[in-house]
Amino acid sequence: MKFSQEHEELRRTVRQFVDKEINPHVKEWEAAGRFPIHEVFKKMGDLGLLGVTKPVEYGGMGLDYSYGMVMSEEMGTVHCGGVPLAVGVQTDMATPALARFGSDQLRRDYLAPAIAGDMVASIAVSEPQAGSDVAAVKTTAKKDGDDYVINGTKMWITNSPSADFFCLLANTSDDKPHINKSLIVVPKDAAGITVDKPLDKLGMRSSETAQVFFDNVRVPQRNLIGQEGMGFMMQMMQFQEERLFAASNSLKGMEHVINETIEYARERKVFGMSLLDNQTVHFRLAELQTEVEALRALTYRACDLYINGQDVLQLASMAKLKVGRLAREVADSCLQFWGGNGFMWDNPASQLYRDGRLGSIGGGADEIMLGIICKTMNTLPGKKK
């Protein structure tokens, strides 16, 4: 992966924004369980940061995904996971299919305001009984005149309390599970939508996540993204960018915890010597940094192939699997070296311990990633007849 001057300029812009507009407020937002998402997104939109890879005609920069990856990696310098998660939902989860397959009208009405930071987007796929098993979703969208009538519920929906619209996956026919689903843009103010109170999560505290109910919600059929019945395929495509986002976004957060742990261990005296001088400590930190660099190389390679039009299903799944596990490993190992201080709520290692755990669940659990990797390796057993 070769980075141009434009890549580096984008990197500096994102880092300056994080240092000025986000990190000084992280503790306050984490304690509140939310952040001023419309205000932050508008500032990001004004800088072009919500449309880096989106079409120029709708306000985006029109750049390839290597620039999106750079932005994601620099957003990892935020000292919590919740704010970058909310941004990633907007840029890499709720809008890729809309940008690629949406009609001109849909893109004018929803994509352009999302890029500008005037609208907050949310991706409504998971349900109480259908998380990683996307084919099992039960929400329906049935035709009635020129409308779809939507009924069902979506669970663990990030950004939903503040969202202006949902990119919703629903069953639009009674056909087989992989060809009966469609993606539909649903405005938040449509009658029949109820957003429950924000969920009390282990981590990602500053991002709001809630259950959403759809009770005879009417939206015009023109809100369909692409073709009816192609929703599952489009969602699988969106997952590729979501998984690359997850991997790249975690790199600098893990490095931050490693570096903070090094500085603490250097100053901490135990039995008359620096904690860092213990071989078990500095060797372990070297191992962790090596693992982060290996993940960075894997993520960059996947991105490089992706922007050159190659299938990265296997590599993106590997990166997603690795980041979920490595974040837990880095957090747990570093927390141990902080001792009692690591068990405190505002410690950088404990922050990663809480936030990083989502990496092995959201966007497809570790077991789903392993299944995908096995399938690409042709080692997955066939279904018994």
Image (cartoon, rainbow, N blue to C red):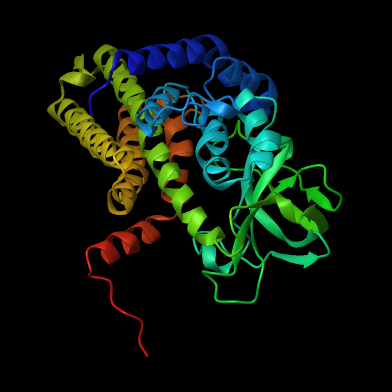
Residue 85, compared with residue 191, is above or below; it is above
Q: Residue lying furthest right in this view?
A: 191
Residue 294 shown left or right of residue 161 in the figure? left
Decide which of 101, 259 is in the foreground and name it. 101
Residue 277 shown left or right of residue 105 in the figure? left
In the picture, which quadrant includes the N terminus? Answer: top left
Residue 215, compared with residue 179, is above or below; it is above
In the picture, which quadrant includes the C terminus? Answer: bottom left
Residue 29, compared with residue 210, is above or below; it is above
Residue 362 shown left or right of residue 166 in the figure? left
Q: Residue 375: x, y in percent?
A: 29, 66
Residue 159 can be seen in this image: no
Kindly indicate the quadrant of the structure image that contains residue 248.
Answer: top left
Residue under the image location 71 percent in, 41 percent down: 165
Q: Residue 371: x, y in percent?
A: 33, 64
Residue under the image location 32 percent in, 16 percent down: 264
Decide which of 166, 346 is in the foreground and name it. 166
Kindly indicate the quadrant of the structure image that contains residue 281.
Answer: top left
Decide which of 284, 49 is in the foreground and name it. 49
Residue under the image location 60 percent in, 55 percent down: 125
Residue under the image location 61 percent in, 34 percent down: 207
Decide which of 98, 269 is in the foreground and name it. 98
Kindly indicate the quadrant of the structure image that contains residue 201.
Answer: top right
